[in-house]
Every structure is written in C-alpha cells, then in structure tokens.
Amino acid sequence: MAHIVNFGFLLLFCFVSLVVKAYSSSDMNALDAFHQGVSDPQNAMKNWDTSLYDPCTWFHITCDNDNRVIRIEIFRYGLSGHLAPQLGNLDRLEYLNLDENNLDGPIPQELGNMANLKSLSLNGNRFSGRIPPSLGKLQLLFFLYLNNNKLTGPIPGELGDIPTLRVVDVSSNNLCGPVPRGGSLSSIAITTIQGSTNLANEALDQDSTNNLDGKD
C-alpha cells in the first residue's frame, strides 16, 4: 500500500513539474522574442541564454515562487528596436519598466493581455503610433507612464475601464483630441499638457488643471 501511495505522489510531482515547465517555457519564449527584437549596446541582457531552462536567473528579471516572471526592469541601458508582441504572453507580469531607452515603433496591442500588470512604464523612448485601446483590459493597472515619446492620436477612453488606475502620464507626445474623463479617469489627473498642444485642453476640469500645476 505504501508503494502505491509513494507512486501516486511521484506521478503528482511529475505532473506539477510538467505544468510549471510549460509555463516557464512560455515565459522564456516571450523573453527571447523581446531579446531578439532589440539591440543591447550595454549588454544588459548578456546572460539571457535560452539554453538555460530557468529565465529567473537572467539579469533584470524577477520571478515568483512558481518561477513565473513578474517583473522586468531594464531602464537607461540604451536599448533600441521594437517591442515584441509576444511580451503579451507574460500573464503573470506585474511590473514592466523600460524607461529612458531608445525603443521605437508601435506599442504592441498584445500588452493588453498581461492580466496581472500593475505598472507599465515606457517613458523616455521613441514609441510612435497610437496608444492601444487594448490597454483598457489591464484591470489591475495602477500606473501608466507613456510620457516623452512620439505617440499620436487620441487618448483612448478605454483607459477609464481600469478600476485601479491612479496615474496616467502621456505628456510630451503628439496626441490630439479631447482628454477623456469617463470611468476611473474622472477621479484622477491625466498629465497631458506639456508637449501635447493638439489636445483639447478645455476638456480638463479645474481640479485636474490644479493637480497638473502641482497644486493641492
């Protein structure tokens, strides 16, 4: 009987290990696609080796207790190139910080699939195109920093669908159209005015304008 119980535990352990391996492989594939899509002049990702099973050992990566990637922080390293859409497959990711690099091209709409994301910080790059409305699916997002890029078009009203949102900074872009005030956006100040002269600034109410000026 004891042998049967031990064999059952062994099977369970193998099954759990396979599930964790599958998830980790998915994370590793997403990270590898990101790595392949950018130039890394300062070798910030020099140990990102796909022959290593565990990406949790890679520089600038943090994982949870299940060996799933929850944090990527690579800022001020001069990265250039495009963001890989596969980053959206990092469904446990909570923090993505790629500030002050030289990344360009569009912000992939697939980033809206990162269901656990709490902070998205892409400021100080050269991203162009529109802010993806799909970011409105990030239902746990607190902080959104897209300032100091080359983004165009309107601020998507879908951001108001994020109940947890506390900070939105899209200043110093080339945005246009009205500043949306629906949903959760009605209770926070959207920092937009600097460098965004085509926005309909009159859409901001007086309280928001005071906040933008640093007033209480």
Image (tube, rainbow, N blue to C red):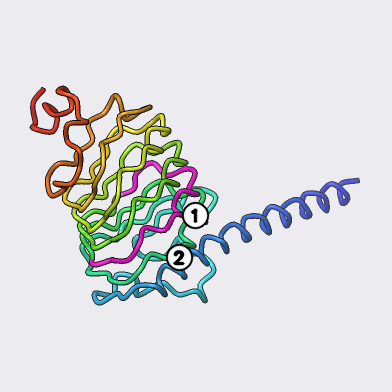
* Distance between the alpha carbons at the discs numbered 1 and 2: 9 Å
Task: Kindly identify the residue that appears in the image at 41 percent across and 38 percent down.
Answer: 158
Between 98 and 153, the residue placed more toward the observer is 153
The answer to which of marks 1 and 2 sits earlier in the sequence is 2
Specify whether 19 is left or right of 198. Answer: right
Specify whether 98 is left or right of 90. Answer: left
Amino acid at the residue labelled 1: Leu
Q: Which residue is mark 1?
A: 90
Q: Which residue is mark 2?
A: 31
Amino acid at the residue labelled 2: Leu
Which picture quadrant has residue 165? top left
Task: Kindly identify the residue that appears in the image at 34 percent across and 75 percent down.
Answer: 46
Between 126 and 121, the residue placed more toward the observer is 126
- Percent across and percent down for residue 121 are 29, 50
Quarter of the image with the C terminus in it = top left
Q: Are marks 1 and 2 in contact (CB under 8 Å)?
A: yes
Q: What's the magenta region?
A: 102-120
